[in-house]
Amino acid sequence: MNLRVRHRAAAWAFLALFALSQALLWYACYGNGAKTLIGDEQGYQNTALAILAGGPWMPSSIWPPLQPLLLAALYALFGPHAWVAQIAQSLLLIGCAALMRGLWRDLGGSVAAANWGAALFLLSPQIAGFAFWLWPEIPHLFLLLAALRLLAAARRSPARGWIAAAAAGACVGLALLAKSLLAAFWPAFLLIFVRRTRPRLAWRNALGFVLALGVVTAPALLHGWRSYGTPMIADSSIYNLWVGLTDRARSDYVADMGGVELPAFLASGATPQERNAVYLRKVKDYVAEHGVVTVALAQIERQYFRLFSAKTLLVSQLPGPACAGHLSVYHSPPWLTRVLALLNDASHALILIGAAIGLACWRRKFHMLHLVVALLLGYQLALFGLIHVKARFLLPMLPFLCALCGEVLARVLAPRRDDGALALSMPRLGLGMLLAALLLLLAFAGPALDGLCTG
């Protein structure tokens, strides 16, 4: 079988698997009645419908406005049906895979690895499931990956890259309007405009990036200034810090403090500043009472179990015992529940193992785009060591984990086509296996350590 025939067969196999996985997810969502909206999903839905009815476009100081605005726009065009948003987000999911494939090539990864990574991303049910939920994770991820690709393009052409830089700034601005994740990180993107030769800064490109970001976020910032006396989009940072300190379980939706604490937080003050002041004092008192070392150890013992948990948002919503954190908002039959849970666990474990080995064995030359991506991942790991964290917060890291796993799969399945991206020496492989074991422990040991459903 020649190379072209193998590639064509692989493409058709992927399309068949993708169609099958999508069919399973759609059937789970609607086959025995539509999945019930939960938590913030219902909030975004209600806000979108209120906007359509003439309500304010930015009614909350906690949740950024982009997701309800996007939902309202889709509903205005095609009707107020959840499936409209799900189709749109499914298209964005495919766009995310295409962007991560190109970004991995920008980072020096092989074509085969980029293809494997994109395939893993699209076929993993815990990732593809995000397109069926009304949280802003998929639009946010699409904008983040688009910004990184555009920044890579701007760096390749420092003299004429201002258009790409401005487009990247607009994407980051929209990402800030979708989620607050990048609020403290976005200035680090300016590192991409630092050069080795003089002038040291591609200042036109950097200026285009900042101006575009400012233009996109200006209406929301102005709204915050007029409403609360400070230029803000949304701020739940201190609330999330408090909940992150007081969470107790290593899995989502087990004695979860988020929904319990939110009414008290909203009632604690008339403005975001007042609420933050009240809860910052609670955080300081908590740390003073328990001690910095004790609090830090408690965070380490809990937060990363929650972040890397194999009980993903998909599994949490499937039918199952409430004592283990199952919400049972899907009405899937037992056979489908078992199939989705098995595929979830298998793909989650594969991605973590492959990413651990790929990271340990990676040997491409490190350049500025690598630094920005590494800082972005490190920033998220540090942030999620403190604030309220759920398994869905791993999504912005998953494209890179899938791509690293793709490098390992490409090397193992086609060893003759080694492009030198990985150095499979014994020390590196040993380090990779240790990291894989740690990630698997974090992924699967949490419920057992918490003694869930043991009475």
Image: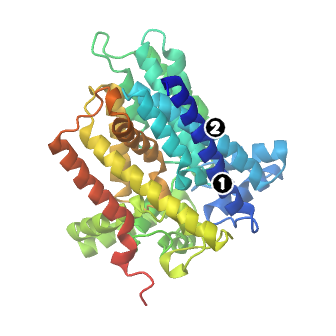
Which residue is at 63% across, 66% downward?
336
Residue 348, image x, y percentages: 44, 56
Q: Is residue 83 above or below residue 175?
A: below
Q: Which residue is mark 2?
A: 219
Crowd band around label 2 with a 10 angstrom C-alpha radius: few (<14), some (14–19), many (20+): few
The residue shown at (34%, 40%) is 412
Q: Is 454 on the left-hand or right-hand side of 275?
A: left
x and y percent of residue 74 in the render?
A: 77, 44
**Residue 445: which quarter of the image?**
bottom left
Report the front residue among 385 and 267: 385
Mark 1 — residue? 132
Farthest-out residue, front: 1
Query: Which residue lies most toward the bottom here?
Result: 455
Q: Disc 2 marks which amino acid?
A: Pro
**Residue 218 percent location from the top left of the image:** 59, 35
Identify residue type, mark 1.
Answer: Phe
Identify the residue shown where x is 81% and y is 50%. Answer: 52
The local secondary structure at tag 1 comes to helix
- Label 2 secondary element: helix
